[in-house]
Image: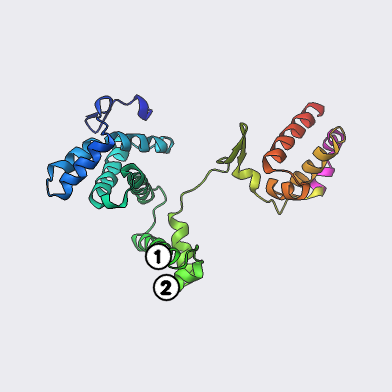
Amino acid sequence: MAYLCKVEICGVDTSKLKVLKADEMRELFLKLDAGETWARQELINGNLRLVLSIIQRFSNRGENPDDLFQVGCVGLMKSIDNFDTSLNVRFSTYAVPMIIGEIRRYLRDNNAIRVSRSLRDLAYKALGVREQLAKETGQEPHIEQIAKRMEVTVQEVACALDAIAEPVSLYEPVYRDSGDAIYIVDQIHDEKQGEDAWVQDLSIRQAMQKLAPREQHIVKMRFFLGRTQMEVAKEVGISQAQVSRLEKSALKKMRKQM
């Protein structure tokens, strides 16, 4: 069931969720800082719609929306408890990544591929060290630096981080331009793809002869030589989006010829 169609989650009627205004948020945080604990519950109730909007991003995971909503609420409560009103930052700007992080941790811990607790702990520690090093140096640290700071081997850090990485579909779009999507599969280099396997097929060669010179060049580089669209774009001197469009057009023409 789509989250947008689910009116009640965890016994909460989502159609009646309250949304706090900016001035109401500030007032409640001031009261909470002054020790008026009732303001915390008001802040939670006034931001449940934020949690609802975030869990919709995970609607394709097949997870129970009630479970995700509860986990999101945990992230919301942590955000409220740790929010610093003196930073002049909107609460939602601070809360959204914390709520998403809480949900992602839940999904990792409940993944069908079970990862040992020790490996997860090592991975989370590595992420913390990476963030700390990035702050210290102002740049993304290498895995060797992380391993050295943690006093473990590079292999241990790499295995731990790989274990908690979420799988990605080859057809996950990484870029869109005028409606044309570029997918991860378009950026994969195929070392095994050779020209010999293609030129043996006479129908393909004949179809290619009907293409414009640039289209022929792109098709040859992509499917004869196994180049990625990014590599082709650099060699031809056009954008990757243009390569994608020309490639699709060329393949369409070839299919008609064949």
What residue is shown with label 1? Answer: 132
- Pinpoint residue 195: horizontal percent, then vertical percent: 81, 48
Identify which residue is drawn at 50% across, 70% down: 144
Quadrant housing residue 62: top left
120 versus 204 height, above or below: below
Q: Check disc 1 and give the amino acid type.
A: Gln
Q: Residues within 10 Å of mark 1 (few under 14, many from 20)?
A: some
Q: What amino acid is found at the position of numbered circle 2 in the picture?
A: Arg
Residue 68 picture location, percent across and down: 32, 40
Any magenta on residue 206?
yes
Q: Residue at x 44, y 62 (%)?
A: 160
Q: Which mark is residue 149?
A: 2
Q: Which numbered disc covers residue 150?
A: none
User: Disc 1 or disc 2, which is closer to the eye?
Assistant: 1
Q: In the structure shown, which secondary structural element does the residue marked by tag 2 occupy?
A: helix
Relative horizontal placement of residue 238, taking residue 87 as reference (left or right):
right
Q: Which image quarter holds the C terminus?
A: top right
Q: Which residues are magenta?
A: 196-208
Q: How many badges with numbers are in the image?
A: 2
Lower position in the chain sequence, tag 1 or tag 2: 1
Q: CA distance from mark 1 to mark 2?
A: 10 Å
Quarter of the view holding residue 37? top left
Q: Quadrant of the N terminus?
A: top left
Front residue of this view, candidates 207 and 173:
173
Residue sitting at 50 percent across and 67 percent down?
143
Q: Secondary structure at mark 1?
A: helix
